[in-house]
Amino acid sequence: MTSEKLSAGEVACYLSHYCLWQHVINKNIPYLIVFEDDIHFSKSATVLLKQFEWLPKKFDVIKLETMYERVVINKGVSLVLGHMLCRHMCMAGYIISQQGAKKLLAMTEKLGIDRPVDHIMFDRLIEQKNSSVHQTFPALCIQDKIYNRDSVRFGSVLEDARKVVIAKQKPSGFEKVSIELIRVFAQLSPKRIGYTGWLIMKGYKKRKINFPQ
């Protein structure tokens, strides 16, 4: 399977997660915890990953890691969880339920593999009506490249390949102007402003997801 928009490595990465989601359905597993091999765990991870009473009764995905970005979440789902309302990329650590696996498999069947897998899980899925995507705070894990900015222990072949794909897809001058105009009008649209105002009125805040040392 190939994609003009993704490198071969990105397609393989997507399919590896896709197979895990399919495994959840095939084996009737209530939920599955997925970790990449280049992460650091927080001290609280030991406690939380030994018992799971803190999990919501119904959820699609719970993101366990942080990129140290500010994320719009609704604090109040539990003491350690917030309902995620905006994109928060990377998939180094997450918990996926059966209902989440079904939704992601259906989205992949409908859209194909046209973007990196984390853009599907932590962007497109969040946009879906009645989605239930959560974020732990503080985070339970973090990738080495984020935790140790100068570290070269875990080189990323995907990132290098992604740069090549992006370079090939570099838009022309006219396309750049068109893209920028669309972005500006989208930001200024009443619908976008109204939604942001609604979030603020409801008490949603943009907060940095920390990782305890």
Image (tube, rainbow, N blue to C red):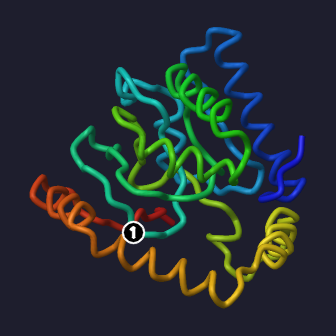
- The local crowd at label 1, few if under 14, some if 14 to 19, many if 20 or more residues have their Cα within 10 Å, is some
In this view, the residue in front, 16 or 137, is 16
Residue extending farthest to the left is 201
Name the residue at 9% across, 58% down.
201
Give x and y (percent) for residue 140.
Answer: 51, 50
In this view, the residue in front, 41 or 115, is 115
Q: In this view, does 43 lie to the left or right of 14?
A: left
In this figure, what is the number of numbered marks? 1
Which quarter of the figure has residue 184? bottom left
Picture layout, residue 128 above or below residue 116: above
Q: Is residue 40 left or right of residue 140?
A: right
Quarter of the image where the N terminus is located: top right
Picture layout, residue 145 above or below residue 18: below
Q: Mark 1 points at which residue?
A: 70
- Which secondary structure lies at badge 1? strand
Give x and y (percent) for residue 112.
Answer: 71, 39
Name the residue at 64% across, 39% down.
111
Give x and y (percent) for residue 129.
Answer: 35, 36
Give x and y (percent) for residue 108.
Answer: 66, 35
Name the residue at 51% across, 47% down.
124
Name the residue at 75% across, 80% down.
170
* Residue type beneath disc 1: Arg
Residue extending farthest to the bottom is 173
